[in-house]
Image: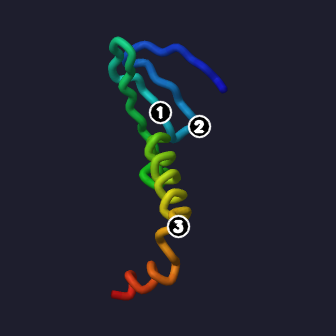
């Protein structure tokens, strides 16, 4: 992992197409801006983890049977 220190309005370039800029800092937080091609998906890691967890919970729930789910979807 590369760790860099940046001040407000300073940025980091990744390749030619991605720029990460420190927009604002405060006590215990930093707001960043990301400029990247629209074709590149940018997601917050905690949201990805939450969706994964919910999906695993949904498929492991013993109360839901695949046949029941299939019938519900057909309605």
Q: Residue furthest front?
A: 63
- Please state which of residues 61 and 12 is positioned toward the viewer in this rendering: 61
Identify the residue shown where x is 42% and y is 26%: 21
Structural distance between the alpha carbons of marks 2 and 1:
8 Å
Dot placed on the residue nearer the N-terminal end, 1 or 3: 1
Asked if 11 appears above or below 43 in the picture, the reply is: above
Q: Indicate whether 73 appears above or below 47.
A: below
Check disc 1: other Cα within 10 Å, few if <14, some if 14-19, many if 20+: some
Locate residue 74, reporting x and y percent. Answer: 38, 87
Against 60, residue 29 (above or below) is above
Identify the residue at horizontal 47%, vertical 55% (top origin): 54
Which comes sooner in the sequence, label 2 or label 3?
Answer: 2
- On screen, residue 52 above or below 63: above
> Looking at the image, what colour scheme do you see?
rainbow
Instruction: Give the class, few, some or many, for how many residues have Cα within 10 Å of label 3's Cα (few <14, many ≥20).
Output: few
Quadrant holding the C terminus: bottom left
Q: Secondary structure at mark 1?
A: strand
For marks 2 and 3, give the one nearer the viewer. 3
Work out which quarter of the rendered image holds the N terminus and state it: top right
Q: Which residue does the image show at 52% across and 78% down from the upper left?
A: 66
| Residue wearing tag 3 | 62
> Where residue 13 sits: x, y (%)?
53, 30
Task: Say what secondary structure mark 3 lies in.
Answer: loop
From the viewer's side, name the closer residue of 67 and 53: 67
Pointers 2 and 3 in contact (C-beta within 8 Å): no
Tag 2: Cα neighbours inside 10 Å, few (<14), some, or many (≥20)? few
Residue at numbered disc 2: 15
Per the image, the residue denoted by label 1 is 19
């Amino acid at each position: 992992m590369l760790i860099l220190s940046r001040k407000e309005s300073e940025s980091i370039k990744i390749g030619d197409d991605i720029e990460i800029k420190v927009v604002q800092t405060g006590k215990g937080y930093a707001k960043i801006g990301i400029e990247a091609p629209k074709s590149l998906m940018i997601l917050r890691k905690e949201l990805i983890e939450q969706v994964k967890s919910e999906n695993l919970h949904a498929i492991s729930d013993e109360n839901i049977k695949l046949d029941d789910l299939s019938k519900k979807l057909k309605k």
